[in-house]
Image: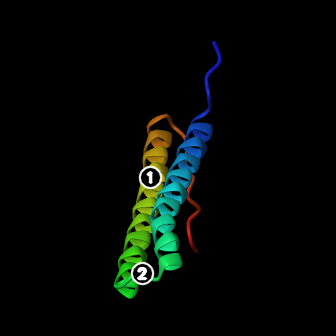
Amino acid sequence: MACFPLSFIVAVLVWAVLIWAVFAIIKLLLPLILSALGASEGFVAHVISTAIAILRIIVIAIVVIFLIYFVYDLAGCLLGGGLSIPRIR
């Protein structure tokens, strides 16, 4: 019986997080672009709130990717392997 290596599963999870983040940012930018075409009132406030939401998505994606690698390292230590994150000397 063949199984996927743990590093493959980590790579798939990281790609899933990145794809989720890109689609979430696109969903935020589409209304902004469409409202810019109409030049409605409160456009600057809408731009600022969109920028804050994009930053929030990026921070969440970074934290989730860090947690994926952290759990991968814990599982690797549990199974007898070493750490996958290189140490800074």
How far, Cα to Cα, is label 1 from label 2?
35 Å
Residue at left offset 45%, top offset 60%: 61
Which is more toward the observer, 54 or 6?
54
Disc 1 and disc 2 in contact, CB within 8 angstroms: no
Residue at left offset 40%, top offset 84%: 43
Q: Is residue 83 visible?
A: no
* Amino acid type of the residue tagged 2 in the rendering: Val
Q: Is residue 27 visible?
A: yes
Q: Residues within 10 Å of mark 2 (few under 14, many from 20)?
A: some
Colour scheme in use:
rainbow
Residue at left offset 57%, top offset 36%: 6
Which is more toward the observer, 75 or 8?
8
Which is more toward the observer, 62 or 33?
33
Position of the N terminus by quadrant = top right
Residue at left offset 47%, top offset 59%: 27
Q: Position of residue 3 (x, y in %)?
A: 61, 22
User: Which residue is at the far front?
Assistant: 38
| Helix, strand or loop at mark 2 | helix
Q: Which mark is residue 70?
A: 1
* Amino acid type of the residue tagged 1 in the rendering: Phe
Q: Position of residue 26 (x, y in %)?
A: 53, 61
Q: Position of residue 18 (x, y in %)?
A: 55, 55
| Residue at the disc numbered 2 | 47
Q: Position of residue 52 (x, y in %)?
A: 37, 76
Q: Residues within 10 Å of mark 1 (few under 14, many from 20)?
A: some
Q: In terms of sequence position, does the residue under pointer 1 or pointer 2 come before the other?
A: 2
| Left or right relative to 45: residue 54 | right
Q: How many marks?
A: 2
| Helix, strand or loop at mark 1 | helix
